[in-house]
Image (cartoon, coloured by chain):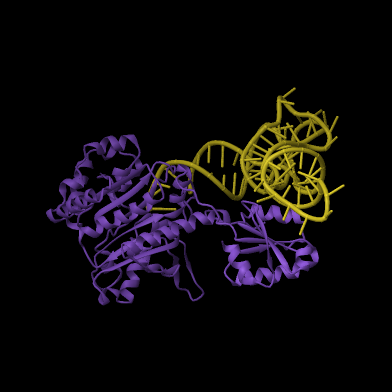
Amino acid sequence: MIKTIAGTKDTLPGEIVKWRYLEDLVRKVMSEFNYKEIRTPVFEETALFARGIGEATDIVSKEMYTFLDRSETSITLKPEMTASVVRSVLEHSLDKQQQLNKLYYISPMFRQERPQAGRFRQFHQFGAEALGSSEPSLDAEMIIVAYEVLKSLGLSSLEVKINSLGVPESRENYKKLLREYLSDKSGKLSEESRKRMDTNILRIFDSKIDVDQEIMQNAPLLMEHLDDDSLEKFEEVKKLLLVAGIPFEIDPKLVRGLDYYTHTTFEIISKNVGSQSALCGGGRYDLLANEIGDRDIPGVGFAAGIERILLAVENEKSLEVSEPGIDVYITRLDKELFGDAYDLALSLRRSGLNVELDYLQRSVKAQMREANRLNARKAIFIGGEEFERNEIVLKDMESGDQQTIALSDLDSIANKTKG
RNA sequence: GUGGGUAUAGCUCAGUUGGUUAGAGCGUCUGGUUGUGGCCCAGAAGGUCGUGGGUUCAAGUCCCAUUACUCACCCCA
């Protein structure tokens, strides 16, 4: 039997209600903050991600779904959205139509990693990008928007972590300091961390290995070596979060794996989703547009993992959503009346009601059991003596009350079914 | 890419020191008198015990391999 590919999954009808609820919520919150939806293709030229995310990152170097299409063009399924959004803004000169573009998306992403709890190869993110301003008020807005959505889902045990990476110059100076600090200790570092000294030295802070953490305990911190402008901006972000009532902590170890981040980086984590605890991550990327295009556009954004969020919702039992149920189930008393039931169903459906009936020639009892299972608000009986008098019986499934209505009076049937 | 765990009905799981026709609950279907659901009762369908080898008189049960799933590392959302 053919099954889904590892790391992908079907979302079945019973689960879809939660997805729809979350998507509706995202759209509502994004509208409140005046973000406009953008949709970009599922695949792009490989070079976009290679340049935009960074050749050396794990995402680009070992996780992308990259292949040659039939005309030998290197194609990549999008592993994240920011590069695509920036490409789109540049391509359509949205930045020239208006100075600030506030955009949001809900989209599948693809990364070929080993699946585990909260990690899939096709996964879904919603997120926002604000392009055209380097104001810290937008950095804070990203965190506020993301937090707003997560809070509205009833999630507790959220932690907001923020940090600032400053600008490249101060960061490079700091990296030199860090390298000096580690130079005589590198022998004691884990093999992984020794490798990082050359590739991405900041990530050594992230190591979960005890010896590494011990050594990094006394390492100089980037925060202490930021330039004045970066510090000022970071202060502003903190101030705005305080005013917004968002609890946060500063995490100097929060170093994102993607190359394009500058200034603010942040993450919102949950304790209730296993080891892949980051529900949401983002930051400022003032240098990205120039990397993939021909002009500077400052930007800030975030992405949130829908599967992880729903996992947290599931584990915290913070949300009750159920299938809405149908308006009316048409029960036919005699098998010969299927055609009449079918006609009535069509008429009621055309007047906007959600209607179901039996397609399996089942008994009246079985039909009623089905009506009950479908959580039908009303049932209509068609047949017997009432049908000979050209009437139907309308039953309220909750109270059990029944009334007869003329079959020809469709408006009356529809209205009473609604009410 | 590297480790650990699991694999029996549609789902959740039992299955005793290897020993006859492999079980339960839920779900599904049918019925419990003329044309009416939820609760209850009765019955039915549904499994080559992940796959392939091996040990044995005998394997769901022991051994090996393989695949899938899963959790963790890594990385990230």
Residue at figure coordinates x 51%, y 74% from the top left:
A70
The location of residue A181, given as percent across then percent down, is 20, 41
| Left or right, A84 with reference to B68 | left
Q: Quadrant of the C terminus of chain A?
A: bottom right
Q: Which chain is yellow?
A: B
Residue B16 falls in image quadrant: top right
Residue A188 can be seen, yes or no: no
The front one of A127 and A284 is A127
Q: Is residue A231 left or right of residue B4?
A: left
Q: Residue B44: x percent and y percent?
A: 81, 46
Question: Does residue A43 sit above or below A111 in this rendering?
Answer: below
| The N terminus of chain A - image quarter | bottom right
Of B42 and A347, nearer the camera is A347
Q: Nearer the viewer, residue B39 or A109?
A: B39
Which residue occupies the foreground of this view, B53 or B58? B58
Q: Position of residue A184 (x, y in %)?
A: 22, 39
**Chain painted in purple in the figure:** A
Q: Is residue A277 visible?
A: yes
Q: Position of residue A173 (x, y in %)?
A: 17, 52
Query: From the viewer's perspective, is A343 left or right of A269?
Result: right
Furthest-left residue in view?
A228
The structure residue drawn at horizontal position 33% and vertical position 51%, both measured from the top left corner, is A147
